[in-house]
Image (cartoon, rainbow, N blue to C red):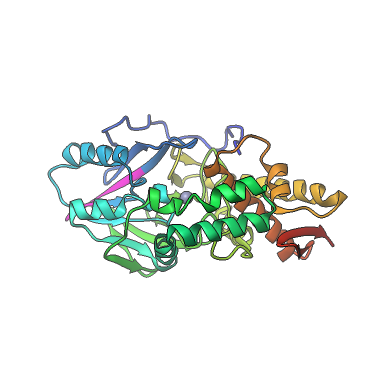
Amino acid sequence: MSNMPNPSMPPLAIDPPKTGKMVALADDLYWMRFTLPFRLNHINLYAFDTKDGWLLLDCGIQSQAIADQWQVMLAGPLAGKPVIGIIVSHYHADHVGYAGALAAITGAPIYMGAVEHAQASWSLAQSDAAFGTIMGDTYARFGLDGDIVDRIRSQGNYFRKLSGDLPDVTIIDTDHRFHSKSGIWTPRFDTGHSPGHMSLSDHDRKLHICVDFLLPRISPNISVSLRSIEIDMLGHYYSYLDQMRHLTDDWLIIPGHDWPYFGGGVRAAELIEHHNTRLDLLRGAAGTGPITTAGAMHALFAFDLTDHELFFASCEARAHLNHLVAREEMQIQTKDGIDYFHLG
Ligand SMILES: [Zn+2]
């Protein structure tokens, strides 16, 4: 998943903010970093300084540790001005999880795109039994081992463990503009890493907050959704990357994880190449006979996976298989409840 550092993608020469601090990326844009209990051990959150108060971007998971970190920020660097809004880029728990609680503390509205809001609402609405059944059935179709399938069935709704309820969400679209003190931010919505992910650009200052779509170090997870495991997520992501390839090197790319950097166009080209290589791996793996999603996952991810990682790895493998089906290079056949993919 990691890539070698590319000299054409210089990081912004600035140290990441320490716990409880924020660092200015522009005179009206601040970078915060919260710790997370995952392999990806942190998330970057942002605060826009507006004439009416703070506009925040993304929230962290719902947990005591995240609550404590917000308390330190609200009582420290963010004190003295009201929070006037909370933007949530996409439905993944590390971005949306604490949004409801943060809205309750600050009284600020939450802003989301319609697709991500629908996805988050669906995920939150599933009972433990329903979620376990969907996960178990999906893993069975993937051809994962029976003990994993059984374990996941009894795990319940893992999303609800990391995400709180989402009251009073204001839905926005591409016509919406967020105004900070020195800039105007235009949202765009893309499918790939999630179904309707919001990123934000200030075109005059060439600032692009890509959140999770153009990360500098790791390849963003490209997964099918439990709601529609047939979707060609990778095809949509390729469309996004194809557009971002034309970003000039003077744009500052501001991500949801790791560090701000220049060279977003180079990174987009690198990610296109990365996924092309993954597709080649799967063409090779299917060369000796049909493969399951589990088989594709083992071909792509050759290291031990926690249950949390297994979810993203298997859904990413499936997204790559779906793309080969969309390109009419593979066909899918279901036998005894398991999906098999074969060339031709
Ligand atoms: Zn994400």
Q: Quadrant of residue 74?
A: top left
**Dominant secondary structure of the magenta stretch?**
strand
Residue farthest to the left, as pictured: 80
User: Which residues lie in the magenta part?
Assistant: 45-54
Q: Out of 208 and 251, give the one closest to the viewer.
A: 208
Q: From this view, report whether residue 174 is shown above or below residue 205.
A: below
Residue at x-position 14% and y-position 48%? 81
Place of residue 14 in the rendered image (x, y in percent of width and height, measured from the top left)? 38, 31
| Quarter of the figure with the N terminus | top right
Place of residue 162 in the rendered image (x, y in percent of width and height, measured from the top left)? 39, 48
| Quarter of the figure with the C terminus | bottom right
Asked whether residue 83 is in view, the answer is: no
> Is residue 47 inside the magenta stretch?
yes
Place of residue 275 in the rendered image (x, y in percent of width and height, measured from the top left)? 67, 49
Q: From this view, report whether residue 162 is shown above or below residue 32.
A: below
Instruction: Count the numbered circles shown.
Output: 0
Residue at x-position 61% and y-position 58%? 138
> Is residue 136 inside the magenta stretch?
no
Residue 320 placement, left or right of 107: right
Asked whether residue 81 is in view, the answer is: yes
Place of residue 48 in the rendered image (x, y in percent of width and height, measured from the top left)? 27, 49
Residue at x-position 31% and y-position 40%? 66
